[in-house]
Image: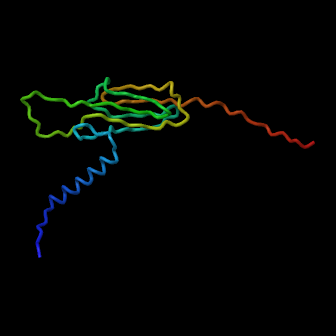
């Protein structure tokens, strides 16, 4: 009978690898060349007049952000670049993720796509999507056809 020594660290690393594979599969091809993935955090809210999307994009320059609307689908995409230090600096840890990102949202049918506005302040992208003005519904009078 052969005895196998239990290595809890090896089990933990195997578990981490499985979790990474599942997360990578669920995020699709949104990973950068360096293997790091990120997806900006987004708040979505509704006011009486508009839908508002707020995305956290710290460290992303305005020229690296794109907003597109196609087939009632709003897509925010862009790229956060790696900030390289001088050649004499040595990193001990890198936790901030860099690379491309993309988030998409289906727009409801009652929005005015031509009046969408966006502003970018202090790393927060805010997109305001006004609701379309609803046409007043005309009442229909039912007339009796019996004489």
Q: Which coloring applies here?
A: rainbow
Residue appearing at x 19%, y 57% in the figure: 12
- Left or right for 118, reference 115: left
Q: Residue furthest front?
A: 1
Rendered image quadrant of residue 80: top left
Q: Residue furthest left?
A: 88
Rendered image quadrant of residue 15: bottom left
Q: Residue furthest right?
A: 147
Residue 54 coordinates in the image, percent (x, y): 38, 34
Q: Residue furthest bottom?
A: 1
Residue 19 coordinates in the image, percent (x, y): 27, 53
Residue appearing at x 15%, y 58% in the figure: 9
Residue appearing at x 93%, y 42% in the figure: 147
- Left or right for 73, reference 56: right
- Left or right for 47, reference 103: right
Count of residue discs: 0
Q: Work out which quarter of the rendered image holds the N terminus and state it.
A: bottom left
Residue 40 coordinates in the image, percent (x, y): 33, 37
Closer to the camera in the image, 2 or 56? 2
Rendered position, 21 above or below 109:
below
Closer to the camera in the image, 13 or 141? 13
Residue appearing at x 26%, y 37% in the figure: 32
């Amino acid at each position: 009978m052969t005895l196998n020594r239990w290595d809890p660290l090896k089990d933990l690393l195997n578990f981490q690898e499985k979790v990474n594979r599942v997360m990578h599969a669920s995020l699709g091809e949104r990973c950068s060349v360096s293997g790091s993935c990120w997806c900006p955090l987004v708040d979505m809210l509704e006011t009486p007049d508009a839908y508002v999307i707020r995305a956290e994009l710290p460290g992303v320059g305005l020229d690296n952000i794109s907003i597109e609307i196609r087939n009632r689908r709003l897509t925010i995409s862009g790229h956060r670049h790696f900030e390289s230090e001088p050649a004499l600096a040595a990193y001990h840890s890198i936790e901030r993720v860099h690379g491309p990102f993309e988030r998409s949202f289906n727009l409801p049918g009652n929005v005015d796509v031509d009046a969408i506005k966006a502003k970018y302040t202090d790393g927060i992208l805010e997109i305001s999507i006004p609701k379309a003005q609803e046409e007043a519904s005309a009442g229909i009078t039912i007339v009796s056809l019996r004489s």
